[in-house]
Amino acid sequence: MFVFLILVIVIGYAISWYTQAPEILYIAVIFAITMNFFSYWFSDKIVIKMSRAIPVSPQDNRELWNIVENLSITAGLPMPKLYVINDPAPNAFATGRSPAHSAVAVTSGLLQILSKTELEGVIAHELSHVGNRDILVATIAVTLAGFIAVLADISFRMTHFKGGDRDNKGGGVLMILAIVGIILAPIAAKLIQLAVSRKREFLADASGAMLTRYPEGLASALQKISGYAMPMKHPSHATSHLFISNPFGMPDAQRLGSGRSIGFMNKLFSSHPPVADRVNALLGSK
């Protein structure tokens, strides 16, 4: 959060210096705080609507309801709102600003291919996201990353129309630094967001395994999910980091058992850790 705030201030300062408009810096900081507030209160409703999820009652799917209810009690969490997404791609996500305002959604494809113990592993993983406050962290991260990208784009366009004293040597150097900062800031923000997402996935795997006391269930579920390479019907880049698996489909190199190594750059720009790494962590493989 501190690094994100620094990036906002740097971009705001670069624009305000270049355009000789100090008020732009204050506007940038205030807007970032406002965006955080909005995402905190309304992110769960937005994500559910974007995912086309349908509410589930105990009468609709008693087994799924019982699994979520039992694991919620075990974890000491309130029963979250439960949703199903009509999609053959196996996937799931959790959302909500706090345990008291949380929701868990699973796809119809997930319910079809997983056994009960595997489904328990996935639900435990999602409930761990809720208990660890990962949803709040991820929502703020993606909001700030998006805001920085928009701010940088606006800034870059403004540099073509307005500027300060660029005739002197020092001003020219500062102008170049400002433009470089505007270009690199959204890339840095995106890398921070992706790194946060990957770390929280590992944490949720570990917490979910502790909750069920059966890490093999989640490991097996991840193997089955990774074997389904097709994307979801309505994926969104804005919400992809929330899912247990990439909703755009998993590249061959990221699927378990592909026999292909994953390069450093691919890992760096991925919102999810490689499935093989997650399974190895769960099963204690070296």
Image (cartoon, rainbow, N blue to C red):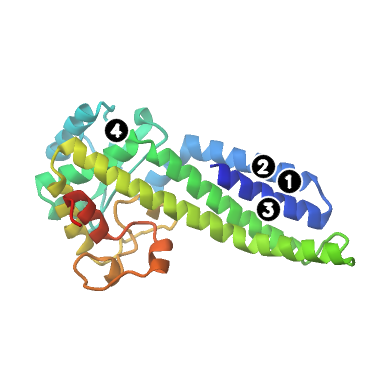
Q: Residue at x 26, y 73 (%)?
A: 260
Mark 1: which secondary structure?
A: helix
Name which of mark 4 and mark 3 comes first in the sequence.
3
Q: Nearer the viewer, residue 49 or 6?
A: 6
Question: What residue appears at the point 24 percent right and 30 percent down from the top-left corner?
Answer: 75
Q: Distance of mark 4 from mark 3, alpha carbons?
A: 39 Å
Instruction: Provide the secondary structure element on which disc 3 rests.
Output: helix
Looking at this view, name the residue that lies furthest to the bottom: 260
Label located before the other in sequence (4 or 1): 1
Q: Which residue is mark 3?
A: 11
* The quarter of the displayed image where residue 128 is located: top left
Specify the amino acid type for callout 2.
Answer: Val
Q: Earlier in the sequence, mark 2 or mark 3?
A: 3
* Kind of element beneath mark 4: loop
Q: Is residue 119 visible?
A: yes
Gap in angstroms between the C-alphas marked 3 and 1:
8 Å
Task: Classify residue 44 as left or right of residue 217.
Answer: right
Badge 4, how many Cα within 10 Å: few under 14, some, many 20+? Answer: many
User: Which residue corresponds to mark 4?
Assistant: 80
Is 110 situated above or below 101?
Answer: below
Q: Amino acid at mark 1?
A: Leu
Q: Closer to the camera, 256 or 145?
A: 256
Looking at the image, which residue is at 43% across and 45% down? 138
The residue that appears at 32% across and 69% down in the rendered structure is: 262
Give the residue at the far front of this rendering: 286
